[in-house]
Amino acid sequence: MDINSRKLLMQEKGAVVPRERVNELYQKIDEYVYGMNRREIDMEKAYETISTAPNSESNAILNSWKGRFADPGLPLYKSSRVEENQSRAKVFYRKAVELDIEGMAEAGDQYACTCLGEMYRRGRGVYRNKSTAVKWCRKAAEQGYADAQFN
């Protein structure tokens, strides 16, 4: 199934977050998580941005982010609003895979490439594979997503 067919299927299910909105959300999340664009690091606001996004449960990238916040193995992503729970994190990572984060990455989505690279690097939702992680992060960096260079 090509990317346009996937988009059409998701639209039929009423579950599409417009691409521009996802880009905007991802940038905002990065700003809160990493303190970019002179924002204070604020995990509470980062999680709020993720969890209040329209149809966030149907978006592979946002599910990957939810997995990071629920994952007790990732101490960077701490929020008082999220109970750390490995099984809950696995559900989010699996959902990202089910929603075809790999297809999105193959179609050139730089954010999907970065999230997928992180998932492979840590073995979250997929089997751990460092060379595959490097491949996806490199692809995101080649598309101009500078943060991918640090994964």
Image (tube, rainbow, N blue to C red):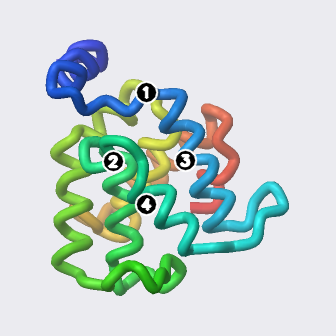
Which residue bears the numbered disc 3? 26
Q: Is residue 138 left or right of residue 35?
A: left
- Residue at point 50%, 57% (across, down): 49
Mark 1 residue crowding within 10 angstroms, few (<14) / some (14–19) / many (20+): few
Of residues 150 and 18, the one drawn nearer to the viewer in this rendering: 18
Mark 2 surroundings: few (<14), some (14-19) or many (≥20) residues within 10 A = some
Q: Is residue 118 toward the left or the right of residue 86 in the image?
A: right
Reading the chain from its start, which is encountered first: label 3 or label 2? 3
Answer yes or no: do the residues labelled 3 and 4 have beta carbons within 8 Å?
A: no
- The amino acid at mark 3 is Tyr
Q: Is residue 59 above or below residue 38?
A: above
Disc 1 secondary structure class? loop
Coordinates of residue 65 in the picture (x, y in percent): 41, 60
Secondary structure of the residue carrying numbered label 4: helix
For badge 4, the amino acid type reads Glu
Position of the N terminus, as image quadrant, is: top left
Image point (65%, 64%), residue name: 32
Question: What is the C-alpha distance between the residues marked 1 and 2?
Answer: 11 Å
Disc 4: which residue: 118
Q: Mark 1 highlights which residue?
A: 18
Question: How far is mark 3 from mark 1, CA to CA?
Answer: 12 Å
Q: Which residue is mark 2?
A: 56
| Whether label 3 touches label 2, CB < 8 Å | no
Residue 121 placed where, x, y %?
40, 65
Residue contact between numbered discs 4 and 1, judged by CB atoms under 8 Å: no
